[in-house]
Amino acid sequence: MTSITSKAVRIDQQGGPEQLKLVDVSVGDPRPGEIRIRHRAIGLNFIDVYQRDGLYPMPVPLQLGMEAAGVVEAVGEGVTHLQVGDRAAYASQPPGSYCEVRVMPAKCVCKLPDAISFETGAAMMLKGLTAQYLLKRTLPQGGLQAGDFVLFHAAAGGVGLIACQWAKALGLQLIGTAGSDAKCALALQNGAAFAINYSTQDFAARVKEITGGQGVKVVYDSVGKDTFEKSLDCLRPFGLLASFGNASGPVPPFAPGILAAKGSLYLTRQTLFHHIATRESTQAMADDLFAMVGSGQVKIHIGQRFALAEVRQAHIALEARQTIGCTILTL
C-alpha cells in the first residue's frame, strides 16, 4: 500500500480567503475506476470561490479545486483510457485539485496532447469545456448560424476570452461586456465583434443599438444578480438567457411572467458537470477543445500565476475582478 505526503489547500469552514490553509495530506493508491495524478499546474475558477465562501454549501473539511494537469502515477482497476506516465488534464468533481498529488475518479481525466503544455492544460479545461458546451450545446430556438449576434458577459475573463475566439471561428458576432476599457480592448483583440464597458455604458441600450433594435438570440451570463434583468432586455423574442455563474451574487427570485412580458423568452441555468457526466461526453467535448487549441483558432491566455502557497492572494484577486484571462497555481 503506497502512502505519499502531498501539500494541499484545505478549508475547515466556509468563509473568506483567510480560511484557505496549506496542509500536509496522505495520498494512497487508486481504487477501481480511479487514478493517482501528480500535478504540474492547477487551474483557478470562480466555482472555487463559491465553494469556499458558502454560496455553494459543501461538507468540510474540504480540499478545493476543480481542474489541473499533470502526470498519471498509478491507475486503478478498470481504467483503460489512461496509463502510468500519461500527460493528462481534467475538470472534474469532486473538488480537490489544489494539491501536489491526488487520487480521483478517472472518467473525466483526459490524455493531454503533447503540443499543449501543462500550464495551458490546467488553465483551459474547466473554462474551455464551459465555452464548448455554451456555444455548441446551449443554443436558442433554431440554433445559431454564422452572422448571428450573441451577448457574452465577462468577455475578458477566462471563459470569456476563449468564447470570443471560438465564436469568431463559428462566424458569430459576439458582443462582449467587461468592466474597463482595457478589458474591452482585450475582448476585441480576441475576436469579439463589439465590446461594451458596462461601468460607463448601458449595455442593454447599446446591444439594441448594435443589433438595429432586434436584440440577440442568446445571452451567456456568468455574472448573475447585477446583469440578470438587463440581460433579458437584450434578447429578441423567443431568445435564450443561459445563466452559468453568479460572480455578483445569485439571481433573486422573480415571477416567471416576466419572461412572457419580455418576448416569450427561454431561461436555463447550466453547469458543466452535467455535460461531462459520462466518459464519452467528456472525451468528445475535450477532443473539440483540443482541436480548437491545437489549430491555433483558440489561444489560452494565462494572465496570472500564483504559487500554491499564495492561494489566498489568488482568491482575493479573482474576487476583486483584478484578473484577466486564466489564473493558475504553480508547483
Image (tube, rainbow, N blue to C red):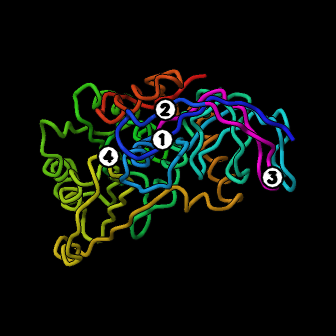
Q: Which residue is mark 2?
A: 21
Kindly state the secondary structure of the residue where label 1 is placed: strand
Q: Earlier in the sequence, mark 1 or mark 4?
A: 1
The residue wearing badge 4 is: 247
Q: Earlier in the sequence, mark 2 or mark 1?
A: 1
Q: Please report the residue visible at 32 percent of the width from the left and 41 percent of the height from the top.
A: 154
Disc 3 from disc 4: Cα separation: 36 Å
CA separation in Å, label 2 and label 4: 23 Å
Frontmost residue, 194 versus 6 = 6
Under mark 3, the amino acid is: Arg
| Badge number at residue 11 | 1
Q: Are marks 3 and 4 in contact (CB under 8 Å)?
A: no
Residue 145's tag is none
| Amino acid beneath label 1 | Ile
Closer to the camera: disc 2 or disc 4? 2
For label 2, the SS is: strand
- Tell me if label 2 and label 4 are in contact, CB under 8 Å: no
- Counting residues from the start of the chain, the first of labels 1 and 3 encountered is 1
Query: Marks 1 and 2: in contact by CB < 8 Å?
Result: yes
- Front residue of 171/39: it is 39
Instruction: Provide the residue span drawn in magenta.
Output: 24-44
Q: Secondary structure at mark 3?
A: loop
Q: Main secondary structure of the magenta part?
A: strand
Binning the other alpha carbons within 10 Å of mark 3 as few (below 14), some (14 to 19) or many (20 upward) gives some
Q: Which residue is mark 3?
A: 31
Q: Position of residue 321 (x, y in %)?
A: 30, 33
